[in-house]
Amino acid sequence: MEYRHILCSVDGSELSEMGLKHAAYLSKTTGAKLSIIHVVEKWYRAADVVTTSPEWQKIHEDWLNKGREVLEAAARKARDGGGAHIQTVLKEGDAAYEIVAMATEHRMDVIVMATHRYSSVGKLFAGSVTDKVSRKAPCPVLWVFK
């Protein structure tokens, strides 16, 4: 399998850093472009209570700035890990939907995501972004377990 374009989702957690390390390694060994995506879900999830007030606009901008910080830190770590041709993408909305949409639009060869080990029953009741992405992804999804 030849990898030309790898997608890795990050959320700033220690767990997502594990996925990023694997994505950077794959990028380094294959020379594939590495796209790192962070999805800000808070604004999307708060849509029912959001107003046009200056306070909400400030909160929104703060959430976006934190997302940019997460991406900058991830790109730095990926470069340190030998990742090649790194780009970052900040999106807003439902994380699973945005990840699948980007993978589809850019014809990704693989999506790398870190996840906890949940039992089948745990997934049934809680679900996870990783599980949702895996069900809809147009390409293989590499799960990195802690």
Image (tube, rainbow, N blue to C red):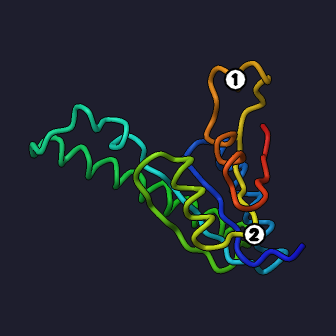
Q: Residue at x 69, y 39 (%)?
A: 131
Q: Residue at x 65, y 59 (%)?
A: 8
Q: Do the CB atoms of the residues marked 1 and 2 lie less than 8 Å apart?
A: no
Above or below residue 69? Residue 45 is: above
The structure residue drawn at horizontal position 57% and vertical position 47%, both measured from the top left corner, is 96
Residue 70 x, y percent position in the rendering: 49, 54
Q: Position of residue 47 (x, y in %)?
A: 28, 38
Give the quarter of the image for residue 34.
Answer: bottom right
User: In this orientation, which residue lies closer to the viewer: 5 or 140?
Assistant: 140
Q: Residue furthest left?
A: 53
Neighbor class of circle 2 (other Cα within 10 Å; few <14, some 14-19, many 20+) is: some
Q: Is residue 59 left or right of residue 12?
A: left
Quarter of the figure that contains the N terminus: bottom right
The residue where tag 2 is placed is 109
In the displayed structure, 41 sits above or below 108; it is above
- The residue carrying mark 1 is 124
Q: Nearer the viewer, mark 1 or mark 2?
A: 1
Disc on res. 115 = none
Give the CA separation, mark 1 to mark 2: 28 Å
Secondary structure, mark 2, is loop
Residue at 75% x, 61% y: name it.
139
The C terminus - image quarter = top right
Label 1 SS: helix
